[in-house]
Image (tube, helix red, strand yellow):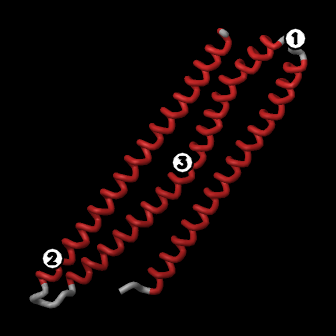
Amino acid sequence: MLTAEQVVAAQKANLETLFGLTQKAFEGVEKLVELNLQAAKASLAESANHTQAVLSVKDAQELIALQAGMMQPLAEKAAAYSRHLYDIASGAAGEFTKAAEAQAADAQTKFMAVVDNATKNAPAGSETAVAVMKSAVSAANNAMESVQKAVKQATEMAEANFNTVAATAVNAAKTTTTTAKKR
């Protein structure tokens, strides 16, 4: 049985985890706001520079070359922004995942302590029921570990795919820019 002190300690730990995760969420929002402000400032400055460059163009060929020259840097900046955004999101998700895994491990440990205590105090002749219960708990723990491993693998695969797509987009922009400049 759980004592009042154990319940209070569990509630306190849960509140500390909640406040910690809330802090991490706010940090993620702050990073996102900072990233968007930087992107907006850079975009405004680049728009002003581009407008000045367009106004100084002397012929259509120069305008086409100017426009083509913007494609690669624009794609690279979009890819960099996406990478930063992904890093912020995955960092926040990682913090939440760590907290969830820690909470699950703690709950699992406490549950196993209750099961062990119950098996020690089980009446004679209930060995089969106790063995079945322990086997079910062990199977559930193994399933949880398998799910956690699968989620980690899927996350790593998604990150690799994201990086590949970003690199492909930048390379495509480079190719387009090079082709446009040759014309």
Residue 84, image x, y percentages:
62, 39
In three-dimensional space, the C-alpha distance between marks 2 and 1, rounded to whole angstroms, equals 87 Å
Q: Which residue is mark 3?
A: 90
Q: Amino acid at mark 3?
A: Ser
Q: Earlier in the sequence, mark 2 or mark 1?
A: 1
At 19% across and 87% down in the image, what residue appears? 122
Q: Which residue is mark 2?
A: 131
In three-dimensional space, the C-alpha distance between marks 3 and 1, rounded to whole angstroms, equals 47 Å
Question: Nearer the viewer's eye, disc 2 or disc 3?
Answer: 3
At 87% across and 11% down in the image, what residue appears? 58
The image quarter in which residue 123 lies: bottom left
Using the image, tell me which numbered label, if any, was put on residue 58. 1
Q: Judging from the image, what secondary structure is the residue with disc 1 in?
A: loop
Q: Amino acid at mark 2?
A: Ala
Q: Residue furthest top?
A: 182
Q: Judging from the image, what secondary structure is the residue with disc 3 in?
A: helix
Question: Nearer the viewer's eye, disc 3 or disc 1?
Answer: 1
117 or 176, which lies in front?
176
Q: Earlier in the sequence, mark 3 or mark 1?
A: 1
Residue 171, image x, y percentages:
55, 23
Residue 89, image x, y percentages:
58, 49
